Amino acid sequence: MNSHLKTLKVGMIGCGVVGSEVARLLEENAEDLAARSGAKLELAAIAVRDISKKREGINPALFTTDAESIVNDPSIDIIIELAGGIEPARSLILQAFKNKKSVVTANKALLAKHGAELYETAGANGEDIYYEAAVAGAIPIIRPLRSSLVGDHIEKVMGIVNGTTNYILTKMDETGASFASALKEAQALGYAEADPTADVEGFDAAAKAAIIAGLAFHTRVTDADVSREGITGITDKDVEVAKSLGLIIKLLAIAELTPDDAISVRVHPTLLPRTHPLASVREAFNAVFVEAEAAGSLMF
Ligand SMILES: NC(=O)c1ccc[n+]([C@@H]2O[C@H](COP(=O)([O-])OP(=O)(O)OC[C@H]3O[C@@H](n4cnc5c(N)ncnc54)[C@H](OP(=O)(O)O)[C@@H]3O)[C@@H](O)[C@H]2O)c1
């Protein structure tokens, strides 16, 4: 590794499903990341709730339960927030900006509720907030919406942004399974949580819809603005009837301009022709379909 490279110290808040992988990738890909980014990224501290938990392959000396000490540490340059939830994540991120640190987060629930406050505080402090992996299973959709398509006029964004519900609907469509048995299978495979409410009632998709709509239409959208219906009311009979008509039921997040130039943002089960590009997205995969004036139809 080039020893003349600058070192950027990274402080991580949270080391669960996502955080432990980020720690592993920072360690295993250190040389590649340094070569590509032009700086060495050194994981310097990690905040967790329970310091006594065993966390394979991560230096135990890095752990603390004092997340504030990390965001207030002047030697740390970048904060990666992977704790989830609203507080203390919101306050810690705001404090990090005030201390002139950039932030990377996967916290879609927080972005959907307090995005405007976070973007404004970041901007006011000359910092930035990055969240490419927070929406749609890490499909790179944020950058295209934030910058690549910024000169175009987006008319509509439709996405399958929740893998759990897409898995359940795929099983119902392909095997005739009931909602309950498809959910059980998704839980056994680790696609669905023991408490699947956030997924099956559409809360997770609504948070992502709010983030996508805000970026697509350059405005503030929170999860409270999103009309939401999940998939718990879908029966095997509904799926069968849809199939007999050449249609498929998908849980879509939809953000579109209405004819009177308002914005409609909603999440609900939708009947799609089986020839639609989103109809072929199976199992736990995500996909986002963008209709823009100049670029036409784009599928991510
Ligand atoms: N899991 C996914 O597939 C996925 C995909 C995209 C985005 N995300 C987002 O990524 C974030 C993290 O998700 P996850 O699945 O990794 O969650 P998780 O497994 O529950 O991990 C959360 C981590 O945060 C720590 N933590 C929680 N509250 C804390 C606090 N107040 N101070 C310090 N540490 C705290 C926990 O500590 P302990 O370990 O001590 O309990 C744990 O290490 C969430 O915003 C989620 O929406 C997750």
Image: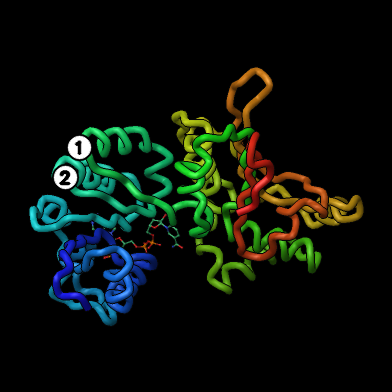
Q: Where is residue 248 in the image (x, y as percent from the top left)?
A: 79, 53
Q: In which quarter of the image is ligand 1?
A: bottom left
- Front in this rendered view, residue 52 or 114: 114
Report the number of numbered marks.
2
Please report the residue visible at 52 percent of the width from the left and 35 percent of the height from the top: 151
Q: Which of marks 2 and 1 is nearer the N terminus?
A: 2
The part of the image, by quadrant, that contains residue 50 is bottom left
- Front in this rendered view, residue 257 or 38: 38
Instruction: Say few, some or many: other residues with alpha carbon within 10 Å of mark 2 (under 14 / 14 to 19 / 20 or more).
Output: many
Instruction: Look at label 2 and name its amino acid.
Output: Lys
Please report the residue visible at 77 percent of the width from the left and 51 percent of the height from the top: 276
Left or right of 6 on screen, residue 118: right
The part of the image, by quadrant, that contains residue 56 is bottom left
Residue position for label 1:
125
Q: Which residue lies furthest to the right in this view?
A: 244
Q: How far apart are marks 2 and 1 (CA)?
A: 6 Å
Instruction: Say few, some or many: other residues with alpha carbon within 10 Å of mark 1 (under 14 / 14 to 19 / 20 or more).
Output: some
Left or right of 232 on screen, residue 81: left
Q: Where is residue 140 in the image (x, y as percent from the top left)?
A: 50, 55
SS state under label 1: loop
Q: Is residue 287 above or below residue 265?
A: below
Q: Is residue 49 something that shows in the picture?
A: no
Q: Report if the CB atoms under discs 2 and 1 are less than 8 Å apart.
A: yes
Give the quarter of the figure containing the C terminus. bottom right
Instruction: Look at label 1 and name its amino acid.
Output: Asn
Residue position for label 2:
100
